Image (cartoon, rainbow, N blue to C red):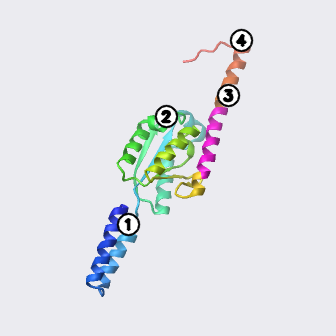
Amino acid sequence: MSLFVALSVFSLWVYCLSLCPKSSILSGLLVYMIWDTPLSNTIGYIRVSSEDQAESHLSLDAQKQQIEAYCTFKGLSLTQILCDEAISGGKPIQSRPAGSELFTLIDEGNTTAVVATKLDRLFRDALDCLQVNAILQASNVHLHLLDLNVDTSNAMGKAFLTIAAAFAELELNRGKERTRDALRALKERGVDLVLG
């Protein structure tokens, strides 16, 4: 239920009570409707690259199950889970197929939260993370990251996301450095590399 609908129901409830203050059945029914229905439209996001599947064995199904369990536990209304398969985390999220769809849904104005299992499912670039988070915050959409227990609906979550984004980018860049160094060492030994 959207915040607008909840406020409308609450206004109706107040109006009905002013007409008939002893109507406890109507009052109880409306309170049940308001509190029993989650006030969020949450979108889950999952991604794997072929390299990630081989190294971490974290499948799309496992990510999906973790997101569903988290949303149930937190009382978030999970409306859908978007999936990017075999897409590098180094690619900006808005240029990925499901990432682009995510921002289309956010632009529609009905999304209140985005949930992912890990920061690196969404970002490996600190600038991309911070720019996207600014867009989410401007749209009043909060980011939830399960591995880091980050929730950007509060100041601590926002600060921790900034720090974690820097370390995610560091991890990506160190991997690139190791690969470059290994290729240089092979070339110096005279190993003929055939790439592609």
- Predominant SS along the magenta part: helix
Residue in front for this viewpoint, 116 or 48: 116
Q: Nearer the viewer, mark 2 or mark 3?
A: 3
Q: Earlier in the sequence, mark 1 or mark 4?
A: 1
Q: Residues within 10 Å of mark 1 (few under 14, many from 20)?
A: some
Residue 30 in sight in this render: yes
Q: Earlier in the sequence, mark 4 or mark 2?
A: 2
Amino acid carrying label 1: it is: Thr
**Vertically, is 177 above or below 11?**
above
Residue 124 in sight in this render: no
Q: Which residue is mark 1?
A: 37
Rounded to the nearest angstrom, the CA distance separating label 3 from label 4 is 20 Å
Q: Which residue is mark 3?
A: 177
Seen at 72% across and 19% down, the residue is 185
The x and y percentages for residue 156 are: 60, 56
Q: Residues within 10 Å of mark 2 (few under 14, many from 20)?
A: some
Label 3: element kind: helix
Seen at 58% across and 40% down, the residue is 126
The x and y percentages for residue 192 are: 65, 12
